[in-house]
Image (spheres, grey):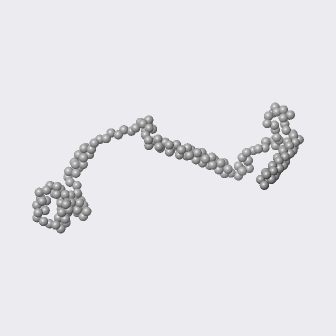
Amino acid sequence: MQKELLSAYIDGEQVSNEFTAKLCQDVELQQSWTNYHMVRSVIRDESEVILGTDFTAKMSALIDAEPVIQVSQPTPEEAEKLPFMQKMRSLLFPLAQIGVAAAVCLVAVWGVQSFNVGGSAQKDVPVLQTSPFNSGVQEVSYNAPAKDVVTTEQLEQKNKRIGVMLQNYELQRRIYADNQTQQGK
């Protein structure tokens, strides 16, 4: 309540002899008076120097009076046991795996595209040459016996047997399907 009266007194609103006498006797009100005038001077930009001559000494004393807190870094073993690091590890490992997979895919795509972009001379050469240079088919093994080599007659017989089996299967499927529809009625 007294600070409100002091503010009004400074503004020239509630000037009284009683409050003036109280202001002269009360040290706390005098300090507030000084602070209010300093604030007013700063707001009105009336004074360039608002810091007292003892500001540097006060600030140095305050800094010296601050307690010194010693903080040490945790060792790697201690850091691994922290809950934050455990959560980060569970989040970062899958992301790292995704990152590695994405990098491998990127390199693969880039490699294929750069391989296919080659000059006009490169377009004439096939990527995978399936026919031999002498345009003749050779046996895979030089010591393969002649009896194991499949002839065209054997291939035709095999194809006929497969055709007969497929016809038999199709006939049985139709018969079975007809029986199912008759039993369902």
**Residue at horizontal 20%, vertical 51%?**
54
Nearest to the observer: residue 92 or residue 178: 178
Nearest to the observer: residue 72 or residue 89: 89
- Residue pushed farthest bottom? 13
Q: Position of residue 141 (x, y in %)?
A: 79, 34
Locate residue 96 relative to residue 127 in the image: left or right.
left
Nearest to the observer: residue 143 or residue 13: 13
Question: Would residue 183 be visible to someone looking at this image?
Answer: yes
Q: Quadrant of residue 158?
A: top right
Q: Position of residue 106 (x, y in %)?
A: 60, 48
**Residue at horizontal 65%, vertical 50%?**
113
Locate residue 31 relative to residue 178 in the image: left or right.
left
Nearest to the observer: residue 163 or residue 21: 163
Q: Position of residue 21 (x, y in %)?
A: 10, 61
- Residue pushed farthest right? 153
Q: Quadrant of residue 148?
A: top right
Question: Would residue 155 be visible to someone looking at this image?
Answer: no
Locate residue 40 relative to residue 84 in the image: left or right.
left
**Residue at horizontal 27%, vertical 44%?**
66
Q: Position of residue 94 (x, y in %)?
A: 54, 44
| Numbered disc total | 0
Quarter of the C terminus within the rendering: bottom right
**Residue at horizontal 55%, vertical 44%?**
97
